[in-house]
Image (tube, helix red, strand yellow):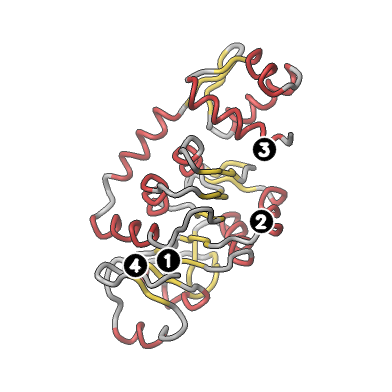
Amino acid sequence: MYQEQRLEKILTLLEERGNLSVKEMVDELGVSKDTVRRDFDCLSQRNLAQRTHGGILPVKNTTVLGFQERQKGLTEDKKKMADLALSLVKDQALLFFDVSTLMLEVSQKLTKKVTIYSHSLDNALVLSGKEGVDFHLLGGRFYSKNRFYYSLHEAQLLQHLQFDLAFFGAASLNQGVVSYEDEEDVAVKQLAMQAARTKVLIAESDKYEKHSKYILGKIEDFDYWITDKKPDPDLIEAFKDRVTILYDGKDSDYE
């Protein structure tokens, strides 16, 4: 069993039991005490568990509270965007979930049996213990401002996958260019884009007024654009037959 598989197992058991000891996991995983200690330390460094003498405790209560506080800022329009995203998801799908508050709303509402890869800490906290979800965290160095992980080795795992759907937020849509604040974040997204059969952009219309410097691509590089209101007619015309635009009042025709 590889380390990431052990970490996923440990997170699942931690969710079920509320605390874990080194001895418990030695018996459960069939590995040495030193291996379990290293795994516990790794989870602690990733802010996925709180290290104690001889074991770990969940950090989910305090971290998810912060998540819930951020969710209070979600407008009804944004919640409807999350519902539109969920309408595209089918059982048994292989998915990529990006780092964004909107995708956290999608994660919370998700009820389908799916496999998900993500580099988002908050997605990990919400999805790792959710029934029916096979969640895989892409680890590495933690970037605290936007709460994601990155390492080249972990990101390259995406080259061996083909996602049915990959969902991407956006920091900016200025001039139709999809861009972000962190170069490392974009490096993960680029690999996910290449590995996706269907690419979904989920971003509000006000992102047209914002600016970010690291470019992922253009709106027309995506198959779907989920947004909060009907775009201007000139945008609809520009993306006609290239991007399916979904907004409240227009139902998904995804098959």
Q: Mark 4 highlights which residue?
A: 227
Which of marks 3 and 2 precedes in the sequence?
Answer: 3
Q: Is residue 62 left or right of residue 33?
A: left
Assess disc 4: are there few (<14), some (14-19) or many (≥20) residues with their C-alpha within 10 Å of its C-alpha. Answer: many
Residue 187 x %, y %: 62, 59
Q: CA distance from mark 4 to mark 3?
A: 34 Å
In this rendered view, identify the residue nearer to me: 108 or 174. 108
Quadrant where the N terminus lies? top right
Secondary element type, mark 2? helix
Q: CA distance from mark 1 to mark 2?
A: 24 Å
User: Which is closer to the viewer, label 3 or label 1?
Assistant: 3
In this rendered view, identify the residue nearer to me: 128 or 55. 128
At label 2, which amino acid type do we have? Leu
At label 4, which amino acid type do we have? Thr
Q: Residue at x 59, y 11 (%)?
A: 53
Q: Mark 3 highlights which residue?
A: 4
Which of marks 4 and 1 precedes in the sequence?
Answer: 1
Assess disc 2: are there few (<14), some (14-19) or many (≥20) residues with their C-alpha within 10 Å of its C-alpha. Answer: many
> In the image, which disc is placed on residue 172?
1
Assess disc 3: are there few (<14), some (14-19) or many (≥20) residues with their C-alpha within 10 Å of its C-alpha. Answer: some
To which quarter of the image does residue 240 belong? Answer: bottom left
Q: Is residue 77 left or right of residue 161?
A: left
Q: CA distance from mark 3 to mark 1?
A: 32 Å
Q: Mark 2 highlights which residue?
A: 158
Q: CA distance from mark 2 to mark 3?
A: 14 Å
Secondary element type, mark 4? loop
Q: Are marks 1 and 4 in contact (CB under 8 Å)?
A: no
At label 3, which amino acid type do we have? Glu
Which of marks 1 and 3 precedes in the sequence?
Answer: 3
